[in-house]
């Protein structure tokens, strides 16, 4: 969801209006960002495995989406890394999900 799409504020499905939300998480995903490529990593032997996932999301109403000034996936608590030496979430130091940080400037 881009800001331009979210600015519509509603979408019509089968004649009924539904409010839309802005999901800024798209901007922090993948290996071309400064942080981890997702918030959750799972390696399985299933035929379909996406490895990195982003189950943890920040969703904003269009009315406040321009107030978002910072968003990142945290890989440290400020003193200790939350990642293993291989760059995966370290479940011995925290959760299997990496935390999110976001700031809204009013």
Image: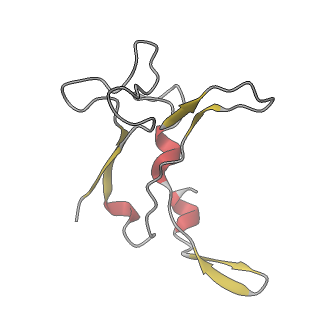
Along the horizontal axis of the image, is 26 left or right of 83?
right
Looking at this view, is 77 or 65 the one in front?
Answer: 77
Q: Which residue is drawn at 39% across and 37% down?
A: 95
In this rendering, position of residue 50 left or right of residue 94: right
Question: Looking at the picture, does residue 48 appear above or below residue 62?
Answer: above
Q: Which residue lies furthest to the bottom in this view?
A: 15
Residue 72's x, y, as percent? 36, 40
Is 47 placed left or right of 38 in the picture?
A: right
Q: Which residue is drawn at 44% across and 29% down?
A: 36
Residue 39 in the image: state x and y as whole percent. Answer: 47, 38
Whether 32 is drawn above or below 59: the answer is: above
Residue extending farthest to the front is 92
Front residue (pair 16, 87)? 87
**Where, quadrant-wise, is the C terminus in this rendering?**
bottom left
24 shown above or below 13: above
**Where's residue 4, x and y in %?**
54, 62
The residue positioned 58% from the left and 57% from the top of the image is: 1
x and y, in percent, of residue 60 in the image: 43, 64
Q: Nearer the viewer, residue 32 or 49?
A: 49
């Amino acid at each position: 969801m881009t800001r331009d799409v979210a600015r519509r504020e509603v979408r019509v499905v089968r004649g009924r209006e539904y409010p839309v939300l802005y999901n800024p998480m798209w901007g922090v995903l993948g290996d071309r960002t400064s942080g981890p490529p997702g918030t959750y990593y799972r390696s399985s032997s299933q035929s379909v495995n996406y490895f990195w996932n982003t189950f943890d999301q920040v969703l904003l109403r269009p009315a406040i989406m321009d107030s978002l000034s910072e968003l990142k996936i945290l890989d440290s608590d400020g003193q200790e890394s939350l990642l293993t030496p291989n760059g995966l979430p370290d479940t011995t130091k925290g959760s299997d999900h990496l935390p999110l940080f976001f700031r809204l400037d009013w």
